[in-house]
Amino acid sequence: MIQQHKKLLFIGGRFDNSGGRSSKIMRSIAKSICMDKRLDDLPGWYDTWITTPRDDAWTTTHNGGSLDALEQAIIDTADHDIVFWFPDVTNDIEKLAPRIKARNPACTLVTSKRNEGRYTIDDIIAHGLRNHANLMLEIKTGTTPYRARVLDPLGNLYYEGSDFEKAGTVLRRRTDDLMFRTTRSQSECVGDEIPPPDDKEFYRVVRSSADKFHGIIDGIAYKERMIGNASFRCAHGFPSMRESGTGSIYVSRRNIDSRDIGVEGFVACEPGIPVKYYGDAKPSVDTPIQLSLYEALPKINYMLHGHVYVQDAPYTTKVLPCGAIEEAREILAVVPSDTTRFAINLAGHGCIIGSDSAAALEGYRFVPRPMPENQTRLYE
Ligand SMILES: [Zn+2]
């Protein structure tokens, strides 16, 4: 499964009109990421490009430089697998980061935010979400010594402390896990929109559950994107495949606010993965997991996923990012295949509940996830 020679790009230090300045903190982080002790000996690290062999990747590192060099780095991100984007720039140049995922949506992106003390954890996460970052490095500059936090967009905390070499090691290990040990499924539009059945009872349950999730994910600016999603199975196949006896599945649209969802909020999908959907609107990023679960759990017809925990429900063990196919395996390790009703907490992510009827999705008590949620033991 492990592919050879991934390409890493590390950008840190100051970038400005007068040639920039290297940063000691960035040198410490880069040293751990590249696993290259020589970085200590480089004089000043001023405007220097280095390519170093890593166990499974080539790393290009740039610590400080001109704005032209930074612009060139944005172009270079397009053919890299993992991008550590930590340039210290004035606020008006900060807008560069969203261009990375726009050019290279498949890369694993780590962004940074310097925090003199005025940003809350919600601000840091909202910043990461705007840039489509997979991980974020927060550098707290209001304290002596400076402190680092390594966070993800679901609010998981992987490192907190003032040892920047250690922060770099945690960044490298977590990005390795994201790159090499989780799988994302592609989705493909395979035909014109197919209108979903008008399952009023289910839509009502989804709206009322989304209201509850919204109520307890309190004060999080990004919560519209964080509420979750839902899906259901219809016993009848699509007109084209009715003969085969396979059902059809409808999943909520990507990034929809499910508090006022109705029939128009659902996208028709064929059973099984990779995801094949009908119409212009893409289904939720969690679709591959839910399609895998419908395949393995024949008596489950409805599912609801939220970024909150269900009180007293069992937990999965691995902390996986939203949309990783491995999550289905984690869930199926806990749920028996003939189940008609289940509720599972997804470690560091939220919950998924499933049932044979829409009404049976109700009656659970939801609790907020801790924010941040401490996962520092994973990379000690
Ligand atoms: Zn999710």
Image (cartoon, rainbow, N blue to C red):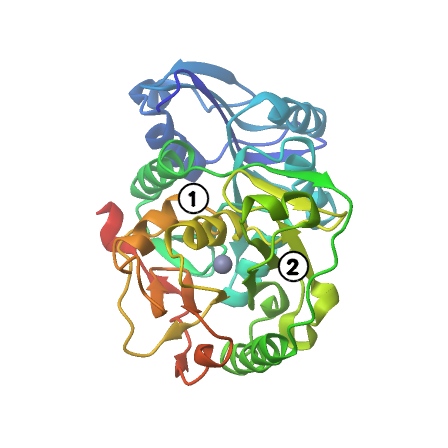
Name the spot of residue 187 as percent of width and height, x first.
60, 39
Nearest to the observer: residue 86 or residue 238: 238
Which is in the foreground here, disc 2 or disc 1?
1
Q: Quadrant of residue 169?
A: top left
Query: In the image, is residue 154 above or below residue 73?
Result: below
Nearest to the observer: residue 251 or residue 110: 251
Mark 1: is the Cβ under 8 angstroms from ligand 1?
A: no
> Mark 2 vs mark 1: which is more N-terminal?
2
Name the spot of residue 124 as percent of width and height, x first.
54, 59
The 10 Å Cα crowd at callout 2, few under 14, some 14 to 19, many 20 or more, is some
The 10 Å Cα crowd at callout 1, few under 14, some 14 to 19, many 20 or more, is many
Report which residue position mark 1 lands on: 325
Q: Please give left or right for residue 380 compared with residue 260 in the image.
A: left
Split into 4 quadrants, where in the image is the N terminus?
Answer: top left
Name the spot of residue 103 as percent of width and height, x first.
68, 31
Please name the residue shown 69% across and 43% down the image: 240
Q: Secondary structure at mark 1?
A: loop
Query: In the image, is residue 243 above or below residue 199?
Result: above
Please name the residue shown 43% across and 50% down the image: 295
Report which residue position mark 2 lands on: 255
Name the spot of residue 304 as percent of width and height, x first.
49, 68
Nearest to the observer: residue 166 or residue 224: 224
Residue 40 appears in the rendering? yes
**Amino acid type at mark 1:** Ile
